[in-house]
Image (cartoon, helix red, strand yellow):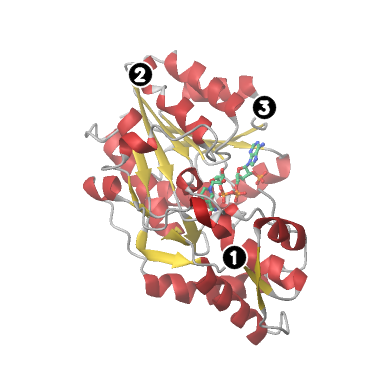
Amino acid sequence: MTTTKLFILGATGYIGGEVLHKFLLQYPDAHVIALVRTQAKADLLKQAINGNLETVIGDLNSLDVIEENVAKADIVINAASNNHLPSLEAIKTSLIAKKTRTLFIQTSGAGVIADSTDPTKQNPNKVYSDVKDIDEINSLPDSQPHRLADKLVQTFKESSKVVETAIISPPTIFGVSNGFDHKTSVQIPLLAKAITKVGYSFTVYKGDTYWSHVHISDLGDLYVLIIEKFLKQQDFPSGYKGYYFAAGGTPHSWKDVSVAVSKLLVEKKLISSDKIEQLNPDQVQKVFGLPALFWGSNAKTDADLGKQIGWEPKKSSDKEFWEDIEIEIDYLKKTGYFEGELKSH
Ligand SMILES: NC(=O)c1ccc[n+]([C@@H]2O[C@H](COP(=O)([O-])OP(=O)(O)OC[C@H]3O[C@@H](n4cnc5c(N)ncnc54)[C@H](OP(=O)(O)O)[C@@H]3O)[C@@H](O)[C@H]2O)c1
């Protein structure tokens, strides 16, 4: 049997790290090539992974490096950016020249279906299913976050007889990752950090907007399940039909998250006021430095496609979501997150 080769972009990241961790548990003999930006990151990965790991130094603009390594791989995972088009063009060029079966998994994000921060343009009852609403998802306007990247990835399969693709589009991700460097997510950690800097919390208008959520471990399972299907040559939706939301439990409101985070930060003496100010999007940007869309829109998703192929979220229940907020804040506090600059994305 030949050794499976995986090329991963974003291996040191929150998502990429969890995915690589789970992949290696299942395929310990695989050969992994990781694109990293610095020698320090290469050393960090090599120290953490005692296996068949090769690192290549470059970034998303290192198009030759990307093309060369896509050409060598059976599986390519992009967990570095859901917006960077030149690297996706390079991946496409290399993929469509291939003669052997190859799987490409793109990490997108449920921001693609986020409605608006403007209450008059919101559609709070809409829940997007990646099965029932796939045509609508595939017709979203280019102005939606990540949409241009999603559209480009969906052309890969039609340009090749040997390429399969899956776009995995997570909503709010929670939980501490088993990754090798970045261990925490974006929306709740960034919110907590911004609150500690300003001294009190906020909601975008009344905060009655909802996002779905998924635990990082369940998200990792979905990548590995699709990889498993590909390697076993089992059918799974790919190309235009291969759009996978990942979500469990019921969507959370950003007001409830804001209240929970603020209460915990007061209890842990990271702030002294439990005031929650109702702000408009411009004020959120100005006072908290945050783009309001990710805390003031609706993005509700049903992961029907993943469930159809056998994905079962195990840690994404409402109970785990709400309990995890304290676990994450404790982890962030312990690791000095509240002391440095905001994690930028
Ligand atoms: N976390 C979430 O809640 C969430 C939800 C939905 C979608 N997403 C999307 O999923 C992707 C990964 O998110 P994440 O939370 O895992 O982010 P992350 O922890 O910041 O990880 C990003 C990874 O990509 C690498 N990277 C970033 N820019 C790069 C560049 N220009 N060239 C080469 N490598 C680069 C980083 O390397 P370094 O170690 O050098 O920084 C890191 O390994 C992003 O596109 C994000 O928008 C995230």
**In front of the other: 54 or 200:** 200
The amino acid type, in three-letter code, at marker 3 is Asn
Q: Position of residue 217 (x, y in %)?
A: 42, 58
Which residue is label 2 attached to? 158
Query: Which circle's residue, 3 or 2, is located before the other in the chain?
Result: 3
Question: Percent x, y for residue 45?
Answer: 60, 47
**Disc 1 marks which amino acid?**
Tyr
Q: Which label belongs to residue 61?
A: 3
Q: Amino acid at mark 2?
A: Glu
Specify the quadrant of the image occupied by residue 241.
Answer: top left
Q: Earlier in the sequence, mark 2 or mark 1?
A: 2
Work out whether 86 lies above or below 59: above
Neighbourhood count class around disc 3 (C-alpha, 10 Å): few under 14, some 14–19, many 20 upward: few
The label on residue 205 is 1
CA separation in Å, label 3 and label 2: 25 Å
Q: Out of 334 and 301, give the one closest to the viewer.
A: 301
Mark 3 vs mark 1: give the one in front: 1
